[in-house]
Image: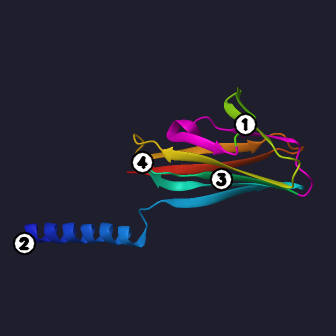
């Protein structure tokens, strides 16, 4: 009688895992975080949940009511590049340097009203059950914009 109850519990747990997989509850999810001020906005689209070894692009968009400065400086948590294997950034920045605790990328904007760039990254194959928070800040505007976001890596 006791073995039968354990078997039933095991079958129910297995069925729940299969159901979660079918509904996509265990899959990759993307989210967006937004910061705004009186004249501009910053949007970061990122993988809120991912798995080891998967491609997880990060898209960063700056929109402004006035033309953006000729050079746009964006500071990013360096830990992002430790958890996620950095492949490339599009378009290529004019420069990259470490400023304090963050990496700062400088882009030429052609003084447009919006600017968008992408990081082509993969979740590190050795990353399992990790949840970390990162920052992206546009530092070259009159009022800097800061976005925080969290990435969780499931097995």
**In the depicted structure, whether residue 96 falls above or below residue 84:** above
Q: 115 or 63: nearer the eye? A: 115
- Camera-near label (2 vs 3) is 3
Locate residue 56 relative to residue 98 in the image: left or right: left
On residue 105, the disc is 1
Residue topped by disc 4: 52
Q: CA distance from mark 2 to mark 4?
A: 41 Å
Q: Earlier in the sequence, mark 2 or mark 1?
A: 2
Q: Are marks 4 and 1 in contact (CB under 8 Å)?
A: no
Q: Residue at x 45, y 42 (%)?
A: 124
Assign a secondary structure to mark 2: loop
User: Mark 3 = which residue?
Assistant: 59
Q: Which residue is the site of mark 2? A: 1
Q: Residue at x 15, y 66 (%)?
A: 6
In-image side of 49 versus 7 (left or right): right
Q: Which residues are magenta?
A: 65-91
- Crowding around mark 2 (Cα neighbors within 10 Å: few <14, some 14 to 19, many 20+) is few
Q: Which residue is rendered at x = 80% and y = 40% of the image? A: 139
Between residue 41 and residue 133, name the one nearer to us: 41
Separation of residues labelled 4 and 1 (CA atoms) = 26 Å
N-term mark: 3 or 1: 3
Residue 80 relative to residue 113: left or right: left
Asked if the stretch drawn in magenta spans residue 75, the answer is yes
């Amino acid at each position: 009688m006791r073995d039968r109850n354990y078997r039933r519990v095991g079958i129910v747990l297995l069925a729940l895992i299969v159901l979660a997989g079918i509904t996509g509850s265990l899959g990759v999810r993307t989210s967006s975080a937004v910061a705004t001020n009186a004249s501009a906005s910053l949007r970061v689209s990122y993988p809120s949940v991912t798995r080891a070894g998967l491609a997880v692009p990060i898209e960063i968009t700056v929109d402004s009511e006035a033309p953006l400065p000729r050079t746009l400086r964006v500071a990013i948590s360096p830990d992002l590049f430790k958890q996620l294997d950095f492949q490339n950034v599009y378009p290529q920045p004019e420069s990259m340097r470490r400023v304090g605790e963050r990496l700062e990328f400088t882009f030429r904007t052609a003084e447009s009203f919006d600017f968008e760039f992408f990081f082509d990254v993969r979740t590190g194959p050795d990353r399992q059950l990790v949840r970390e928070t990162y920052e992206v800040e546009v530092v070259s505007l009159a009022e800097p914009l800061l976005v925080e976001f969290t990435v969780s890596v499931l097995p």
